[in-house]
Amino acid sequence: MKLALPNPSGSVFELTPALREEGLRESRLSPRRRMLLPFHRGQADLVQRMINFMQPGTYIRAHQHPREWATETLMVMSGCLGFVTFDAEGNVLTTHRLGVGGLVDIEARVWHSVLALAEDTMILEIKRGPFNEEDKVFADWSPEEFSDGAPAYLQWLTGLVESSPDPGR
């Protein structure tokens, strides 16, 4: 299963209309309902920069980035994003509904998940590199992607973000 578009090369990257449409098209066709466009030039880069093209129904399992310096910044470029934080037991701490221009920034070791609340949601994601598989730890209390429990869990999270006041504000 295709997870990402290829990293670009060269000293300047531009998100062209054609590349934007390719990312959105790939996200619509993907069984995961999302497609990543990394635009840092390599996995060893010290700043990882990506665009995540997302469709409603994509399930990004709750996770954290455990390394001390593993901050993450997300900014909505189009559509609408739900962002949820949890405590270590899986209790919801905050819900955020972010429109175009909305931004969240989290420190290391924050349990979180993101949800596409509108068709063709695009987010800019920036994390410190280099890429390391050990920097993403999934929560045992959240269903695995494509598991039988994932759709109901995603629906529950979406309902929290869409219908309840944000307890974090």
Image (tube, rainbow, N blue to C red):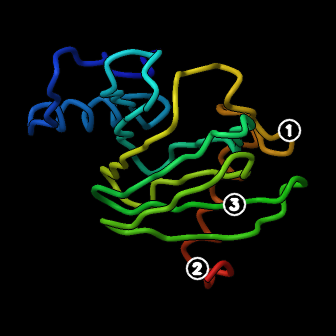
Question: Label 3: which residue?
Answer: 85
Query: Whole-Å distance between the Cαs marked 1 and 3?
Result: 15 Å
Question: Label 2: which residue?
Answer: 163
Q: Residue 76's quadrant in the figure?
A: bottom left
Tally the marks: 3
**Res. 75 visible in picture:** yes
Amino acid identity at mark 1: Asp
Q: In which quarter of the image is the C terminus?
A: bottom right
Depth order, front residue of 41/161 = 41
Q: Tag 1 or tag 2, which sits nearer the N-term?
A: 1
Amino acid identity at mark 2: Ser
Kindly indicate whether the residue at mark 1 contacts the one at mark 2 (C-beta within 8 angstroms): no
Depth order, front residue of 99/2 = 99
Depth order, front residue of 6/27 = 6
Q: What element carries label 2?
A: helix
Indicate the position of residue 136 as horizontal and vertical percent values: 68, 31
Q: Which residue is drawn at 63% across and 70% down?
A: 95
Q: What element carries label 1?
A: loop
Can you tell which of label 2 and label 1 is closer to the viewer?
1
Question: Label 1: which residue?
Answer: 140
Q: Tag 2 or tag 3, which sits nearer the N-term?
A: 3
Indicate the position of residue 114 as horizontal and vertical percent values: 56, 52
Indicate the position of residue 108 as horizontal and vertical percent values: 69, 46
Residue sitting at the far left: 17
Residue 125's place in the image compared with 112, above or below, is above
